[in-house]
Amino acid sequence: MSSSSAAAGGDLVRRMAAVVGRAQCISDPSGLLVYECDGLTHGRTRPGLVVLPGSTGEVVEVVKLAREAGLPIVPRGAGTGLSGGARPVPGCIVVGLSRMNRILAVDLENGAARVQPGVTNLDVSRAVASAGFYYAPDPSSQSVCTIGGNVAENSGGAHCLKYGFTVNHVLAARLVLDGGEVVDLGGSAPDTPGYDLLAVLVGSEGMLGIVTEVTLRLLRKPEATRTFFATFPSTDEAGAAVSGIIAAGILPAAIEMMDRLAIVAAKAATGLDWPDVGAALLMDADGPLAEVEHVAKRAVEIAQSVGALEIRIPRDEAERQLMWKGRKSAFAAVGRISPNYMVEDGVIPRSEIARVLRDIEALAREARLRVANVFHAGDGNLHPLVLYDARVPGEEERAAWVGREILRLCVRYGGSITGEHGVGAEKVEAMADMFGEADLDTMSRVRCAFDGLARFNPGKVFPTPRLCGERPGPYVPHPAEITGQAERW
Amino acid sequence: MVAGARQGTPGDAVVGVVPRLVLEPASVAEAAEALGALARDRLAVTFVGGRTEIELGSPPAALDAVVRTGRLGRLVEHAPSDQIATVEAGMPLAELQRLLAPHHQRLALDPPRAELATLGGVVASNAFGPRRHRFGGARDVVIGMTFVRADGTPAKGGGKVVKNVAGFDVPRLLVGSLGTLALITTVTVRLHPLPEAERCVLFAGLGPAEAQELVAQAKGAQLEPSSVAALTSDGALDIAFRFEGFAPGTAEQCGRLLSLAGKLRRSAELLDDGAARGFWARHDAVRTGGSLRVKIATPPAALVPIASGPLQRMLRSALSSGAAVLYPTVGIAFASGDPTSAEEASRAVAEARAALAALGGSLVLDAAPPAVRALADVWGPPPPSLAIMRRLKDELDPDHRLSPGRFVGGI
């Protein structure tokens, strides 16, 4: 078997096709093209073969065949990830879970839904909406991204400020390991005795195995939601409003900030009649009616007290949805004002928002580029969009430099290099800014407990390639130590 | 002998096993040094905080030394505007709450005996209280950790911000690992605002069917209590709903719950502060009393039926002055008392486990006298992922020196 970027050999293709069906086995160059990258489109690698299994049993057989052939496996959902988490490695087998898109069981009494990994995030909420339930994590890509991908990346979204991330909403998962073993982690009852393997599976970026079933927590919809849109002269006042609201003991369901450039872009894309201002906040409060009305009123007062220019309260649900559409489409909207852009994802302590934004502005000036900021202000999760024109020599490199420097800023301010997009292939180097060798070695050991050959999704998360069992042997004392003639400590 | 160690005494025993040595490092660096020294001498060690959950788990298969975390008691950082705090593992939970209160904040973990329970111990034993209904458990509020590995290597995971997906979530993996993977040295937690108002509504003497109906109705009514807990000793259930938040919201929710009581033709009362304290004191007494305590976990909707079946039979036949706490929305109950006999107790445990197995639930002995331990396994049947757990242990503690034999499946 060739280990280079060449397509997989005919024998393997035949054997895979026997498992999943010929149509679900893609080996021709034009078919493979789609799978060369995920939502992070630069840095493409052609896989050796793409297989699209339709059941846990088929995944097991695919994993076994890949193991026999000695080929790495890269799991993939909808390919909407923004960190290259589903980027192939040369010659690998991409296992696409898109066909496994059924909701298997809904148990409203226990607030749980068992689903296949290829189900989209929004389809889960849609399936239970009429009964008054929903699935809380809501990444902006929720209409297309899959639950399997959400589990791999521990996806968040605007409303995770109050409701938490994927890890807080996964009750159980079925996992296919490297040897083809099928293991269930967690369960419909809480606190399964033993290590909380599910907690580390979520967010493991497809490096521990392939998830073929997930049991999700469903929440009862809140009684009421109150939303307001507030504009400010600059991000300083908007940041002060966020701090003031949090300091007042309010936990909004979501509180989002956009800067001037992001507002301009969102307006251009959606036709919203937002004013040209320095910054805007979009806040949701939800819960029991009386509590929410009180909280929303207080939050509006706080925004006004720190210098809000205008407060808009949606007249109805349609107008509210439109405001949110403006926010959620902001990434794509930036395409209206710039030929190219890079999306960053970093986290800072919420109280440092104003300072960090000024530092980002300085970086942009230094690189002679523009940066639009859209972010989850409540939890300090920045999404700077670095605008550039790839046709201008040097701009793409300068944009990449700004992105890297922003991540360094995040670490310097005590934050993180990623809040929700994952490390993937893109940020492996930045991991070394945040974690030392012992930290990374601990993570690597965890991986080795699941996947002893490190064959699932290689090249992600870790700054340097790691193999299992490759470490100094146990400490052996010198004979002089044993006899007490020398000491090591 | 490891430097700085003292002789172990019966007061240092871990489930009846007395360690030869006791170390009390006064800093994270000293803790790392201590573990390095123990590694050099290949000594088996158990980590001890406030001893509130020391009975959880089997007796250690080997115990040369105990490392106590009591002198690791500092608040490393509290950033009120970021609502996070980093504390050393030995700080008692109540002390942390006292430091946070002037900033109108709290850690939303409320296991009993907060004066004694240390942060490290709470996290390592996955201890929790009634507010888990709203805020989740330790895994939902822990955002970062530093720890020392078996070989004495200090390491960290997570960070200081709530939203963070950089790298594998080692801190969450250490939650509930009972000191068998590493020594937790500092814990970084997400904080919540102290509520402006707290109110409690009590439904006394409900039958199981009524209790089930009430909990479902309250959920259907979109009420958002911070705790739902029931107490029982004779089969009848006293259920309290606690509401926390801003005054207008909590008042309105209590009003709606009381009117729901009218519809269900049950009486309910809004408790005054003293009465509410009384209810939670009874709750704490059940959670901490007796020489035998069991923890039962089921899918939430199955809890009340289990409580009126096998759990009720356990209270009647196997425990003298037994009582139970139920968290019907979480799916966890605790029963406690003194066993009438080890045989009766182990029979009742086996019966409950058989019923729970069919539901995907579990029963764990939170505390048990030696005679009961001799007849009933502490953890019950191991989960299907035991092989991965064993490999994890091999990876992080290859010599099996950290509380060997204490954990699930003899890990």
Image (cartoon, coloured by chain):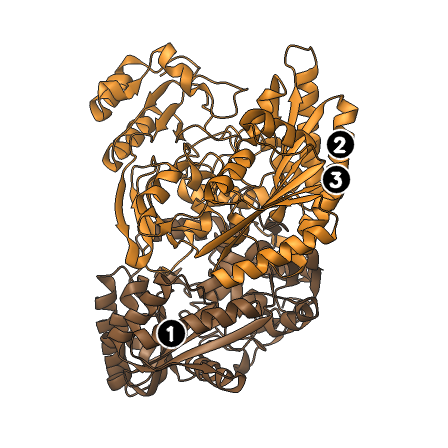
Which residue type carries mark 2?
Answer: Glu
**From mark 3 to mark 1, how far is it between C-alphas?**
47 Å
Q: CA distance from mark 1 to mark 2?
A: 56 Å
Q: Identify the residue at horizontal 60%, vertical 32% (top origin).
A: A273
Q: Are marks 3 and 1 on the same chain?
A: no
Is any part of residue B223 visible from this angle? yes
Q: Chain of mark 1?
A: B
Name the amino acid, label 3: Pro
* Quadrant of the rendering where the C terminus of chain A is positioned: bottom right
Picture coordinates of residue A182, whole percent (x, y): 29, 43
Q: Outermost residue toward the front?
A: A315
Q: Earlier in the sequence, mark 3 or mark 2?
A: 3
Which residue is under mark 3? Answer: A233
Asked if badge 1 and badge 2 are on a common chain, one would say no
- Give the Cα distance between marks 3 and 2: 16 Å
Indicate the position of residue B2 as horizontal and vertical percent values. Answer: 64, 66
- Which quadrant would residue B220 be assigned to in this image? bottom left
Give neighbour class at mark 3: few <14, some 14-19, many 20+ (Cα, 10 Å). Answer: some
Q: Is residue B363 visible?
A: no
Q: Which mark is residue B126?
A: none
| Residue on which disc 1 sits | B259
- Compared across the picture, whether A448 is left or right of A346 comes to left
